[in-house]
Amino acid sequence: MAETKEIDFKKVATPHWAAFQPEHAFDDEKNEFLRKNLGGDKTIVYKRDAGKEDWKCMTCGSKIIVTRVAHTVRDGIFPLSGSGKVKNEDVPYCPKCEEKPAFHGQSIPPR
Ligand SMILES: [Zn+2]
């Protein structure tokens, strides 16, 4: 089989309310990639070198940082009511290329 340099991104299974909906890939050298859609045609790719902890922005080389986004759980009896429960999501972003994600994320509908 021929070696290919092309990276095959696969959609990560995330809940539809999640702020971070990445696509994920590994290359031949076991470097890891996460691609995030920034709306429209714009995407940003984070890279983690094989065996490393830190993710880096492939556009500017900045270290990716993680911020918390809170999702309110709408599990009350009436529509839009809720018990005040919150699910926190850790959302990575590039401090140079992206706006910091808003703290209040989408609310989570009842199951
Ligand atoms: Zn960046």
Image (spheres, rainbow, N blue to C red):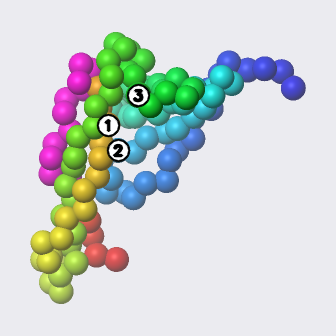
Q: For residue 54, which numbered disc appears in the image? A: 3
Residue identified by numbered label 1: 92
Q: Between marks 2 and 3, how big is the CA–CA gap?
A: 18 Å
What amino acid is labelled 2 in the image? Phe
Amino acid carrying label 3: it is Asp
Q: Is residue 74 above or below residue 12?
A: below
Q: Earlier in the sequence, mark 2 or mark 3?
A: 2
* Residue bearing the label numbered 2: 20
What is the magenta range? 95-106
Q: Which of the two discs, 3 and 1, labels the residue nearer the N terminus?
A: 3
Mark 1 CB lies closer than 8 A to ligand 1:
no
Give the position of the C terminus as an image quadrant: bottom left
Q: Are marks 2 and 1 in contact (CB under 8 Å)?
A: yes
Q: Main secondary structure of the magenta part?
A: loop
Question: Which badge, 2 or 1, comes first in the chain's sequence?
Answer: 2
Q: Position of residue 16 (x, y in %)?
A: 37, 57
Amino acid identity at mark 1: Pro
